Image (cartoon, rainbow, N blue to C red):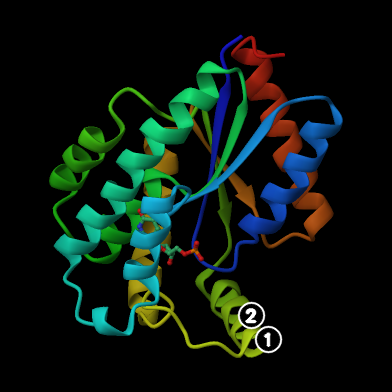
Amino acid sequence: MSGFFISFEGTEGGGKSTQIALLADRLRKQGQHVRLLREPGGTPIGEEIRHLLKHSEANRQMVPEAELLLMNASRAQLVREVIRPALAAGEIVLSDRFYDSTTAYQGYGRQLDLALVRSVIEFAVGPTHPHLTLLLNVSPEVSEARQRARQAASAGPRDRFEEADRHFFERVENGFLRIAKNEPQRVKLVDAAQNIDAVHEEVWRLVEVSMAASGRC
Ligand code: TMP
């Protein structure tokens, strides 16, 4: 049986990690093989690229074009080293972000040419696309408040993305909403301002419907 690929998307503070963990638990309890991934990252090469992109002190001046290519270098590796083999083995792949983050952050956020961004993504992923994308949506105000709370709890330095200004995050949020509007079959909007259990139930319902429609279960 071929696998099923679900990506989780959204701006910071939408609770993606929590929801992915809850979904993975529930699927595993049903006896499914679940593979958890994150982007950028998910392979040894990808995790090094993640450090370059997010945390390396030397990279504060990274230009958007380099950012776009590094995100997609990590993705090209992840798709071939992990995602395709996992799907071929019938696993359910859950990825914390995938290519819609590039469209939203580098395209809408950094304002790179959208057609160019799309062609770089196509080169990186080839025919490998998520069957379902869950966009965990919160307003820029909620996102900012949750980021501040997380920052206060972690005590570590902010990463390069967390340092961007409010206008950047508004463009990113708007980008995600446009993606959802353009691809309503694949991308489902989830109101992530609700409590954790309510969000999880909505996620579960969308996953069940989508997997049933694709004949996965
Ligand atoms: P996160 O794993 O904490 O969400 O951090 C990843 C950061 O990288 C987040 O700020 C979004 C950003 N990002 C992009 O800008 N483009 C991309 O293609 C991906 C996958 C992530």
Mark 1 and 2 residues: CB-CB less than 8 Å, in contact? yes
The residue at the point 58 percent across, 63 percent down is 138
Vertically, is 186 above or below 38?
above
Q: Secondary structure at mark 2?
A: helix
Determine if residue 40 is in view.
no
- Side of 203 where 169 appears, left or right: left
- Side of 38 where 119 appears, left or right: left
Q: Quadrant of ligand 1?
A: bottom left
Q: Quadrant of the C terminus?
A: top right
- Side of 161 where 13 appears, left or right: right
- Residue type at tag 2: Arg
The residue at the point 41 percent across, 28 percent down is 129
Camera-side residue of 50 and 199: 50
Other residues around mark 1 within 10 Å, as few (<14) / some (14–19) / many (≥20) = few
Q: Quadrant of the N terminus?
A: top right
The residue indicated by pointer 2 is 150
Measure the alpha-carbon separation of dots 1 and 2. 5 Å
Report which quarter residue 115 is drawn in.
top left
Determine if residue 177 is in view.
yes
- Residue type at tag 1: Ala
The label shown at residue 100 is none
The residue at the point 67 percent across, 48 percent down is 20
The label shown at residue 153 is 1
The image position of residue 121, as x and y in percent, is 25, 40
Camera-side residue of 211 and 138: 211
Q: Secondary structure at mark 1?
A: helix
Camera-side residue of 216 and 167: 216
